[in-house]
Amino acid sequence: MTAKNLSTVVTDLIESYGNTSKNVINAYRTGGERIVGFVEQRWDRALEASSPKLSADVVENATAAQKLVGSYYAQGLALATNSADTLVNEIVKFAGQGVQQVAANASRFEEKTGVPALSKLATAAVPAAEMVSKLAAQLEEKSAELVKKIAGDDAASVKHVSPFKKARATKAA
């Protein structure tokens, strides 16, 4: 096993937290989509049960209203989760770049001053950072399991379908 330097361990830790964040976002997205499906089912059953007492126009308006509200909710959910995903990607990217820049600056500082204090401190901090990194990897793994549980099947096979694509498919059918 090769010894890792502190910047590599911290970069891996940042990526692990980023993956955990993405898993939480996917759990939120999947849960929100399941809620939309549940509400649509309940609405359809309630409308079906009460439709004999309602005029055709009222049933048509209620169905249109439910589709409109559901579409807005789905669009909002997609916008929020896609934005959160993008934000996490950017934070992980910039944090990783920051760690690499700090490591490079520390090396230059040591070269200029001839004092190896920072590298010794970094070497001493590696075991603690590796321990935190292992804990973060476990957290990432558990969050991935959560997404799979919420999805009800293999999360890797769950594909996000935009509300616009759903609307086009419904309109075409």
Image (tube, rainbow, N blue to C red):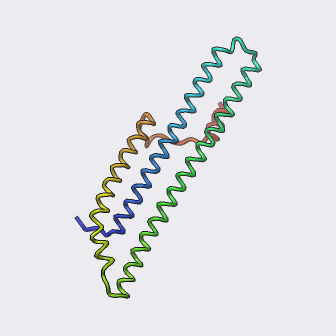
User: Depth check: 28 or 128 in front?
Assistant: 128
Query: In which image quadrant can residue 37 be found?
Result: top right
User: Depth check: 124 or 153 in front?
Assistant: 124
Describe residue 52's horizontal placement relative to residue 83 as left or right: right
User: Depth check: 61 or 138 in front?
Assistant: 138
Q: Quadrant of the C terminus?
A: top right
Residue shown at the point (40%, 44%) measured from the top left: 144
Describe residue 114's horizontal placement relative to residue 18 as left or right: left
Give the residue furthest to the left. 1
Image coordinates of residue 60 in percent, x first then y, are 73, 23
Q: Quadrant of the N terminus?
A: bottom left
93 over 42 or under it: above or below: below
Residue shown at the point (67%, 31%) measured from the top left: 67
18 over 145 or under it: above or below: below
Image coordinates of residue 133 in percent, x first then y, are 33, 58
Query: In which image quadrant can residue 123 be found?
Result: bottom left
Image coordinates of residue 125 in percent, x first then y, are 30, 67
Describe residue 120's horizontal placement relative to residue 47 as left or right: left
60 over 79 or under it: above or below: above
Query: In which image quadrant can residue 71 be found?
Result: top right
Residue shown at the point (48%, 63%) measured from the top left: 93
